[in-house]
Image (spheres, coloured by chain):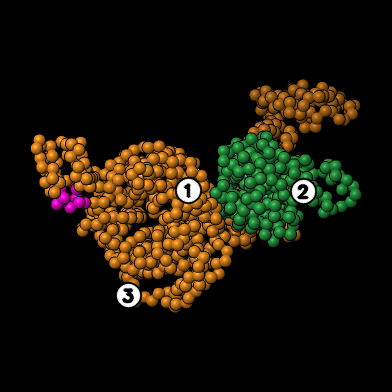
Chain colours: A green, B orange
Amino acid sequence: MGLFTKFVYLLGVRKKEVNVLVVGLNNSGKSTVVNHFKNEEERVSEIVPTVGFSVERFQNQNLAFTAFDMSGHGRYRDLWEHYYKDCHGIIFVVDSSDRLRLVVVKEELDLLLQHPDICNRKLPILFFANKMDCKDALSSVKIAAGLGLDKIMDKPWHIAASNALTGEGLQEGVEWLTQQIRDVILSKN
Amino acid sequence: MCAHQCYQRLSSNTLKFATLPNNACINLCDLNISRWLEAHSDRSAGLTTFARNVILADVSGDGDYKLVLTDVRIQTDKRSRLKVYKGTLLTSDQVLPDVPSSVISFYTDDLEPRVPAVAVACSSDLLIFKNNKPFYKFCVPPGPLTPLEEECWKLFAEPNYDTQKLITDLKSVNFNQLSGRSQELLNLQPNQAQEYIQRYVGITPIKTSPIVCMSTLNRSSQDALAVACPVLGTEDGIIYVLDPQIFTVLHQANVCNVKSTPTIIKTTGMYDVEFRIVVACRENSICVLRRGWLEGKPVVQLNEDIIDLLLIPGDNFIIIGTTSKMLHCYTKRGQRVWSAATVNAITCLCLVPLKHLSTHLIAVGLKGGSVHLYHGRQTVDYTNSPDTPSAMVFGQLGQEEHVMVIITMGGTINFKILKRTADFNLSNQDKLSVPTLQSKPLPLPKRSKLFIEQSMRERQDPMQMHQSFQQDLVNLRLTAARALVQNLTEQSGAGNAEEQVKLSAQILGLGPKFTLILTLENMNGDKAVSNFSVVFHAKPTIYKLSSYLSTVPLIPPGLSYKLETKVTEVLKSGEEQLPGQAIRVFVIRKGQAHPVLAATINMPPTEITTLLFIFSQKFKSACEKMRAFSKRPPDSDILEVYSFYKQATLGDINIPKPSDIQGRAKWEAWNGKKGLAADLAKQKYIEKVQGLSGTYA
Ligand SMILES: Nc1nc2c(ncn2[C@@H]2O[C@H](COP(=O)(O)OP(=O)(O)OP(=O)(O)O)[C@@H](O)[C@H]2O)c(=O)[nH]1
Ligand SMILES: [Mg+2]
């Protein structure tokens, strides 16, 4: 990349297309999170469980995001790995009120981190401890401890408590992800 | 059976010596990583419950399945309770009037939202709860009193009766045939008897029989959420099938022709069609009841006590766990299929249906605190429980489909989740297991019989058979050809057989703005398609597209990708475009010149283009009409028509003024229309010609 284009990127003038993969167990609120990032007029009012996957586009700070909103249902979780190779970042949504399935979340996260398309990359991972409004929701600190996030050494990660219904906490998280992806793109060039 | 031996580590942390079949041994030995995730364990739960008292049901009707169980207290000063857990948290706890024997849940109706009822059997009452609130109480119909007992209670009402004699009389009656009241009387101290009798004097006792076991039977559909009838078994040996809506007895039958007390009931089939109720009895027999029967038929008689019973859906095999550490499998007719010895005493059984592997495992809870999973007679897995399990359930809890809840004798509640990746090596196992030798001749299956009959008929009447076959074949070909033609003409879908991708298009909107939705479907059973792009080709003078080239992400097998493109019709008046034009779509693969798929999408005509088109057609026909006039109109009219024509087709005047008179007159007429819009000029032209045609045509 020439000096000029680098300069352009620094200024954030030109748009860059990035892919993010949105994963997490079913009913964790992935589609609700992605829906919140879209433009006001493109949002859907009712969200149904995703079948297979769906592709959504949104923008943040001059980055054009293509989000692959995967289904979290057990029989569709095999699909996730097909998209690992081409993604620049991962959004991992956790239902913090579902205490029973925290072990399942950990299992899926471990499978993801061990995947050959992921394990050697410096891929930023953003965790949303979603449904923080629920009565018996675990705090993001407890979720981080339960998932053993402190053991992730080679990848930048961040956890944000969120409420996808009101949008609380989502912006903070995605700002972090945008910054991380931008850093990676810059350092690569 | 080859008696390979292996060491097996059990939860007690001592090494035990076990004898297992060969493959079971292999499977157990390579089990370093558990197939189960330990979700939660609460040692302080202090629960006392039994098999068939723990269920998983969507009791709030929101898809968040709850755990419902009874906490049994035998002591008189403590009450039994009905508890509901949401996930791992206890959310509801209510007192039960008596010690419960069994809990079921069933859908009472088809009304939305679907909320199942929970029913608890407490002595001879069936307490039905809905939305966690008492909803209805069903009482088992009373049975007949023995004449002697009836007589005794009549005499109690007389002024001077001999209490002692009457009590001795009551004692002569078989204890089980007495009413609850007399039973209690006989258990009282002699000094309390007098007061007890006084309390009930003059009221004939009612002999009710406690409900000892329960199950549900689907009414008319096999669906998981189908309406189901409660099935009760009483101490007296009577089975009741209840109406799920109004709780009346739909069907009543005796368990067996000899006195038998049911202890476990399992059902299959549908009440309205055909069903089979399998009952385990305290007398160690298994009886089967079917539709219309008034009495069950014993199919199995064992020498050991039955601890638990399961019915395997599909083949309806009956699995029985007994006190002598044995697991038996019988066919629905009572023939033994296999028997397997367990390493420890069996305490409970639980069916583990695995839809994704389309099979069922049998979880066997063993004394000491381990759970073994059987696939047929083979052990395929084992997992630990905090101590001896007293009840187990497997199914959906919360959002998770594969949860096993174990309640132990020590009162611990333990939640385990089956890993998504667990396949129990079942595909390997099938290869390993040796087919059992077949000694009896097989009965001819129904289908083979049909085939034989069919070929006999064919031999008898070959000509006619041939003709009717040919006729059908021609018909089939015709239908296929018609479908093909229709497909080709409609162009709504296009496919590539080799690549196994299918393209279909949908156009939304009335124009001039359309939304074109392309759906690219991957028809491959196992291969994902990638590196595809879609290119659009449209006349730029007619349509403007939001994007002409789109890349398609990887499409996993069996799924489809939707691509949305905005199409805007560019309007240019005066141009004689045909309404409705085509947009061509090419699906191309990266680095390949030849398109994978090509399709033409016929855009619907918009109102405006149609109007414009009709207008220009009108103008054309007016021109022709003018040329075909039989009489010549006056010069002034001709000049006016001429000027409108020129203005309509060429616009403002663009030639120098000629010098001849005729030319000048024409020039002036055209010049006079300067600034008139083309469409308006056309309109005027049409009107003018219309006016003239009356006289000169
Ligand atoms: N209370 C609460 N509910 C939420 C929140 N986020 C999502 N939900 C609800 O959770 C349910 C599931 O949300 P979805 O977005 O469909 O979940 P998903 O992860 O996309 O599920 P799948 O597509 O099946 O994998 C919906 O009913 C949402 O309304 C939240 O922050 N708080
Ligand atoms: Mg979704």
Q: Residue B334 lies in magenta, yes or no?
A: no
Going 10% across and 42% down the picture, which residue do you hit? B162
Q: Is residue A11 left or right of residue B247?
A: right
Please give the label number shown on residue B440: 3
Closest to the camera, between mark 1 and mark 2, is 1
User: What residue range appears in magenta?
Assistant: B170-179
Where residue B245 appears, x then y in whole percent? 34, 40
In-front residue for pair B147/A62: B147
Q: Is residue A163 above or below residue B489?
A: above
Residue B149 versus residue B491: which sits nearer the camera?
B149
Residue B411 % position (x, y): 45, 52
- Residue ID at (57%, 66%): B32
| Residue B178 on the magenta segment | yes
The amino acid beneath tag 2 is Ile
Q: Mark 2 lies on which chain?
A: A
Point out the image quarter for the C terminus of chain B. top right
